Image: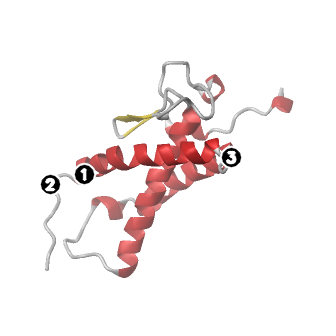
Amino acid sequence: MRQPEPDNPIEQLREFLQFAVPLMIRDLEYRAARGEVSDAWLIGTARRGGTSLGARGDTLLFSDREPRKGRQRDDVTRTTQDLVEGIAAAALLAGEDGIEIFGDRYAPMSRPVHGPARPDRGTEPGQSATLPDVLREPPRPDAA
């Protein structure tokens, strides 16, 4: 049985992210408040999301109109999970001003877990960070 071709897969992905990312942000905020995640873990998670999207992003946007089975379904699931976690982690790292991805803004839901927007990461207060700004390593205090 053939699956119908989606009208606009990018819009469907954006809709999904608008639903899933805020939930993941809240989950990561809760885990960060309990000390279960660190900045280093969040940076790694954000990078993994970008890497996964780059390596397997086509599986999210294109379909041969056949039901996905086995490995194909696992790739879509893993890529989607990595992307959602990566966007949520990057939003937390950026602080209260959040980040903009695919034209949508994502920011921490409650008070910032990791402080306000970080000027050392290329943003000014009130300005959304870009993903490269968030993933850039902060300057080390001994490097001055």
63 shown above or below 103: below
Q: Amino acid at mark 2?
A: Asp
SS at mark 2? loop
Task: Name the residue carrying label 1.
Answer: 12
SS at mark 1? helix
Q: Quadrant of residue 39?
A: top right
Q: Earlier in the sequence, mark 1 or mark 3?
A: 1
- State the residue at coordinates (27%, 63%): 62
Residue 7 is tagged as 2
Q: Is residue 108 left or right of residue 41?
A: left
**Residue closest to the eye, 94 or 58:** 94
Label 1 environment density (alpha carbons within 10 Å; few <14, some 14–19, many ≥20):
some
Labelled pair 3, 2 in contact (Cβ < 8 Å): no
Farthest residue toward the top? 125
Q: Amino acid at mark 3?
A: Gly
Residue 108 is tagged as none
Task: Name the residue carrying label 3.
Answer: 35
Q: Earlier in the sequence, mark 2 or mark 1?
A: 2
Q: Amino acid at mark 1?
A: Gln
- State the residue at coordinates (35%, 40%): 102
Q: Is residue 136 visible?
A: yes
Label 2 environment density (alpha carbons within 10 Å; few <14, some 14–19, many ≥20):
few
| Foreground disc of the pair 3, 2 | 3
Q: Earlier in the sequence, mark 3 or mark 2?
A: 2
Q: Quadrant of residue 117?
A: top right
Residue 38 location in percent, x, y?
A: 68, 46
Labelled pair 2, 1 in contact (Cβ < 8 Å): yes
